[in-house]
């Protein structure tokens, strides 16, 4: 989930940047007057004498951005339960860093504006724009290791939480009590539906829209509804039971394709994944590629003529915002990182060095989406709006440049910012961790000069392809000994564990290898009924003592993990990991090379 989020946000940066440039070009073109006129066009709904109307900018800022904050709420809920925020030791440092990255920029801003007409804008430089930051890190490339991106994403999530709290507490002007009470009752109704486990999308959509309208009328900013609803969406790790049912349904469809089997497999596979994750998958592209760019188009347009720029150059608001982003962010995040490390409150992910932390702290000064959002809440004067937006643009550009320079100059320990799945692999052991013993499943002479130990998974298609190769290899080398150890890939192959247990049941009746061959010949048919049928055909019980069988499988898994096994099949030839191909000729050559010299 984390890598997919990074990919979506970073990929949308170019769209967001294009929308920003388009807004600036539009506002500074000969048709610049049409920019404000267009976004102030009223649009609404009417039903009889009742009307509900907002201008286009408020539909974007109060409506579409509610979906943006809903996605943030989904991400916060997921990370708090299953992701980065679930590990308290890993969250401590970025959380305190995020706090420092808000306090110091606000203080820098207030140095220029305390007691003045711009004092209300202290919240403008506090937030980091995740999309722009991740986009810049993608440009930085190899000097940005993946742990730094994970650190900054965790920091950005905490940053979002704190920014939302600040909006709710400090940027709510007036409260309309009846509307607020209505909103609270509607939120309670949604919580009750969740508690009763009533999962009917139309009910949540109707109640959610009513909650949004009530919150808007109450004076509280309606985007907070998005956060609240996002946090409430159910999230859970896939249970073994659901994975097994989904796997069986897929196997049923594979063996007997039909519309009914397809519908059942689709339904069970969908249910195995939480609603939270499914909504993130659907809404992230819309949020990143549509909603945020439209928000930028509606809010980033500011005139950059000579008079406006001269006024901004001496404006305490523009200076406070720009320096708050440029100096306040890097100072606050650096101090907020150093303090918990010094006090041993937490740890950093990976082997990050201070040069990388400083670079990440600098680029966190890119404040855009939430900064523009708070400008709209803090100020009413259009001239002050322009000065604050110029400060945001200037501070963000200088922060990006400073971060790039730091990454360029800082000592890099060789971290690689590679696409998902291409990061350097960890250095794994090459020696078999546990010698072949009397409890192993052995096929071949006990005094064999060459022994191949296979860590396998009965549902793995690659193990299935290897099976006839090893059979032919034994025919070619009669003195070869084969040892099979279990390494079921539980999260990938839902029937692998059940098959491994059934093979251990057969082993208790002295029929392990017969069951081993049956399972590999029938990899697409590994339901409980299939396994029981295979066991009956061999005259053995499939699950005579499940705890003991499970412990036997777990011992194999533990020895494999200790020996550096991370996937299947993995082979060790005379105790040394096989690094070549798994075709017959390559393995035959490996056997010949492993034979002791006379």
Image: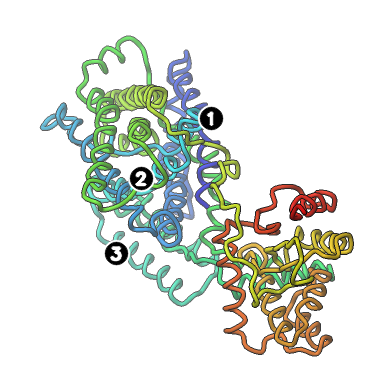
Q: Is residue 210 above or below residue 377?
A: below
Whole-Å distance between the Cαs marked 2 and 3? 34 Å
Q: Is residue 247 left or right of residue 217?
A: right
Q: Which residue is mark 2?
A: 155
Q: Residue at x 48, y 66 (%)?
A: 234
Q: Is residue 352 left or right of residue 335?
A: right
* Foreground tag (2 vs 3): 2
Residue at x 31% of width, y 14% of height: 309
Question: Earlier along the polypeptide chain: callout 1 or callout 2?
Answer: 1
Left/right placement of residue 84 relative to residue 426 reads: left
Question: Cα distance, mark 1 to mark 2?
Answer: 22 Å
In depth, the one of 464 and 207 nearer the eye is: 464
Which is nearer the N-term, disc 2 or disc 3?
2
Q: Could you tell me residue 257's position as x and y percent? A: 84, 67
Residue that mark 3 sits on: 181
The answer to whether any part of residue 41 appears in the image is: no
Q: Residues within 10 Å of mark 2 (few under 14, many from 20)?
A: many
Element under disc 1: helix
**Mark 1 lies on residue:** 14
Label 2 element class: helix
Q: Residue 126 is drawn in which quadrant?
A: top left
Separation (CA) of disc 3 from disc 1:
42 Å
Query: Picture coordinates of residue 584 (x, y %)?
Result: 84, 53
**Image mark for residue 81:** none
Classed neighbour count for the residue bearing mark 3: other residues with Cα under 10 Å, few (<14), some (14–19), many (≥20): some
The quarter of the rendered structure image containing the C terminus is: bottom right
**In the image as oriented, which residue stretches furthest toward the front?**
598
Please report whichever mark, 3 or 1, sits nearer to the chain's N-terminal start. 1
């Amino acid at each position: 989930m984390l890598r997919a989020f990074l990919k979506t946000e970073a990929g949308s940066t170019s769209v967001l940047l294009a929308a920003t440039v388009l807004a600036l070009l539009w506002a500074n073109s000969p048709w610049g007057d049409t920019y404000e006129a267009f976004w102030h066009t009223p649009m609404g709904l009417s039903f009889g004498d009742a009307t509900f109307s907002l201008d286009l900018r408020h539909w974007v800022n109060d409506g579409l951005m509610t979906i943006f904050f809903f996605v943030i709420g989904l991400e916060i809920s997921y990370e708090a339960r299953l992701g980065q925020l679930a590990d308290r030791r890993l969250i401590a440092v970025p959380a305190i860093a995020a706090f420092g990255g808000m306090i110091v920029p606000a203080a820098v801003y207030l140095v220029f504006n305390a007691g003045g007409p711009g004092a209300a804008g202290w919240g403008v430089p506090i937030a980091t724009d995740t999309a722009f930051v991740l986009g810049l890190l993608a440009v930085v490339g190899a000097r940005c290791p993946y742990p730094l991106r994970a650190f900054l994403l965790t920091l950005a999530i905490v940053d979002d939480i704190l920014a939302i709290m600040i909006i709710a507490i400090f940027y709510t002007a007036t409260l309309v009590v009846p509307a607020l009470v209505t909103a609270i009752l509607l939120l309670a109704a949604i919580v009750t539906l969740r508690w009763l486990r009533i999962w009917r999308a139309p009910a949540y959509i109707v109640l959610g829209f009513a909650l949004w309208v009530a919150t808007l009328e109450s004076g509280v900013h309606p985007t907070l509804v998005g956060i609240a609803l996002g946090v409430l969406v159910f999230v859970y790790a896939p249970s073994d039971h659901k994975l097994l049912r989904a796997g069986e349904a897929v196997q049923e469809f594979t063996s007997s394709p039909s519309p009914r089997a397809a519908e059942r497999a689709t339904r069970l596979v969908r249910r195995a994944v939480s609603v939270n994750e499914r909504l993130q998958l659907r809404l992230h592209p819309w949020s990143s590629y549509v909603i945020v760019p439209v928000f930028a188009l509606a809010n980033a347009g500011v005139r950059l003529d000579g008079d406006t720029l001269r006024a901004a150059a001496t404006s305490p608001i523009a200076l406070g915002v720009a320096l708050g982003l440029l100096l306040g962010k890097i100072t606050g995040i650096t101090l907020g990182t150093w303090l918990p490390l010094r006090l041993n409150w937490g740890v950093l992910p990976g082997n990050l060095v201070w040069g990388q932390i400083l670079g990440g702290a600098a680029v966190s000064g890119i404040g855009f989406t939430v900064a523009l959002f708070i400008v709209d809440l803090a100020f009413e004067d259009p001239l002050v709006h322009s000065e604050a937006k110029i400060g945001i643009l200037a501070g963000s550009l200088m922060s990006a440049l400073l971060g790039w320079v730091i990454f360029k100059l800082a000592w890099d320990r060789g971290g690689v910012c590679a696409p998902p799945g291409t990061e350097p692999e960890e250095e794994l052991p090459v020696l078999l961790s546990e010698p072949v013993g009397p409890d192993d499943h052995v096929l071949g002479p006990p005094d064999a000069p060459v022994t191949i130990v296979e860590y396998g998974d009965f549902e793995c298609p690659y193990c299935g392809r290897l099976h006839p190769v090893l059979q032919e290899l034994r025919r070619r080398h009669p003195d070869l000994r084969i040892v099979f150890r279990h390494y079921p890939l539980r999260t990938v192959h839902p029937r692998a564990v059940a098959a491994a247990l059934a093979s251990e049941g057969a082993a208790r009746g002295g029929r392990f290898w017969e069951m081993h061959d049956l399972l590999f010949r029938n990899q697409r048919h590994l339901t409980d009924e299939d396994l029981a049928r295979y066991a009956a055909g061999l005259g053995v019980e499939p699950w005579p003592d499940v705890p003991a069988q499970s412990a036997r499988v777990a011992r194999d898994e533990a020895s494999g993990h200790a020996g550096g096994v991370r996937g299947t099949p993995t082979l060790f030839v005379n105790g040394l990991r096989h690094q070549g191909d798994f075709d017959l000729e390559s393995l035959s050559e490996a056997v010949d090379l492993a034979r002791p010299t006379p």
